[in-house]
């Protein structure tokens, strides 16, 4: 899996997975691991990572009235808008000066949630992805996988977003299966890590995947 990189182009690594997989905790551990390898790491997240992206995050994840529903394509457009801003303002400039970007969630989340979960055709979402990213794709995606019930049970009440509150277990099961399907279709980019293991074990497996990438 080792790929050549010129010193002026950094690695682009994403961390994906269903709810409660421990993505943020693992991202912090992985950032430290990469820094120990001598890389200059910028840790960011989606939706968010820019002033505008964090505002979009507040709006899109806020719990709404029980009878207020959001059209799934509206969600996809908002996530894509936040993504476009993050790519143009943060990710591309950082990669261009050799920084490594570690991003919690990216375009695979839109395919999994708005595509496999909410039923928008994947081809339509891939068009949106291209508009948001101009074709930039991660070098490596770590998929933290675990059973939906386990992940949702890990969430504290104050962490529950509109997505956990509004969508049922069947939706989240489709999301998980969607991520696994995406991983299977791109085995060179994805590494699937069992996130139901203790955090240290998950961190070690994810770090080993990164080491194989950066050589
Ligand atoms: P998180 O930061 O706790 O993972 O919350 C982000 C939520 O937004 C999570 O429920 C997944 C959802 N999401 C989508 O539905 N589509 C997307 O493209 C992204 C980035 C996130």
Image (cartoon, grey):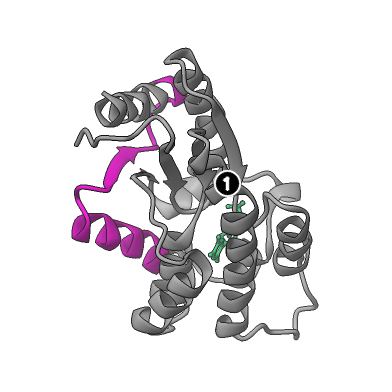
Residue 178 appears left or right of 15: left
Q: Is residue 62 above or below residue 152?
A: below
In the picture provided, is 89 more to the left or to the right than 186?
A: right
Q: Is residue 40 visible?
A: yes
**Residue 69 percent coordinates (x, y):** 68, 84
Camera-side residue of 178 and 100: 100
Choose top left, top right, bottom left or bottom right for residue 86: bottom right
Percent position of residue 91, x then y: 55, 48
Q: Quadrant of residue 194?
A: top left
Give the x, y percent position of residue 192: 29, 43
Whether residue 102 is visible to the viewer of this picture, yes or no, is no
Residue numbers of the magenta segment: 173-200
Where residue 33 sits: x, y (%)? 46, 19
Residue at horizontal 64 percent and vertical 64 percent from the top: 82
Residue designated by label 1: 93
Q: Residues within 10 Å of mark 1 (few under 14, many from 20)?
A: few
Task: Identify which residue is drawn at 48% across, 43% down.
Answer: 21
Which residue lies at the image location 45% right of the left edge and 22% below the top edge? Answer: 34
Which image quadrant: the N terminus? top left
Q: Nearer the viewer, residue 188 or 151?
A: 188
Secondary structure beneath disc 1?
helix
The residue depicted at 46 percent of the width and 67 percent of the height is: 134
Reply yes or no: does residue 137 show up in magenta.
no
Q: Quarter containing ligand 1?
A: bottom right
């Amino acid at each position: 899996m080792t790929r050549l990189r010129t010193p002026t182009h950094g690695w682009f690594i994403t961390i994906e997975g269903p709810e409660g997989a421990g993505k943020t905790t693992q991202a912090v551990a992985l950032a430290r691991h990469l820094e120990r390898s001598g890389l200059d790491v910028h840790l960011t997240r989606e939706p968010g990572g820019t002033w505008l992206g964090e505002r979009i995050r507040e709006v899109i994840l806020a719990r709404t009235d029980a009878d207020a529903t959001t059209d799934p394509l509206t969600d996809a457009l908002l996530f894509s808008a936040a993504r476009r801003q993050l790519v143009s303002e943060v990710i591309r400039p950082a990669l261009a000066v050799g920084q490594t970007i570690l991003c919690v969630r990216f375009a695979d989340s839109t395919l999994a949630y708005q595509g496999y979960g909410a039923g928008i055709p994947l081809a339509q979402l891939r068009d949106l992805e291209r508009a948001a990213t101009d074709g930039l794709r991660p070098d490596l995606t770590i998929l933290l996988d675990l059973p939906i019930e386990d992940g949702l049970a890990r969430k504290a009440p104050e962490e529950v977003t509109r997505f956990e509150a509004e969508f049922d277990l069947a939706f989240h099961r489709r999301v998980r299966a969607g991520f696994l399907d995406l991983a299977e279709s791109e085995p060179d980019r994805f590494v699937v890590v069992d996130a139901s293991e203790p955090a240290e074990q998950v961190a070690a497996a994810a770090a080993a995947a990164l080491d194989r990438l950066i050589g």
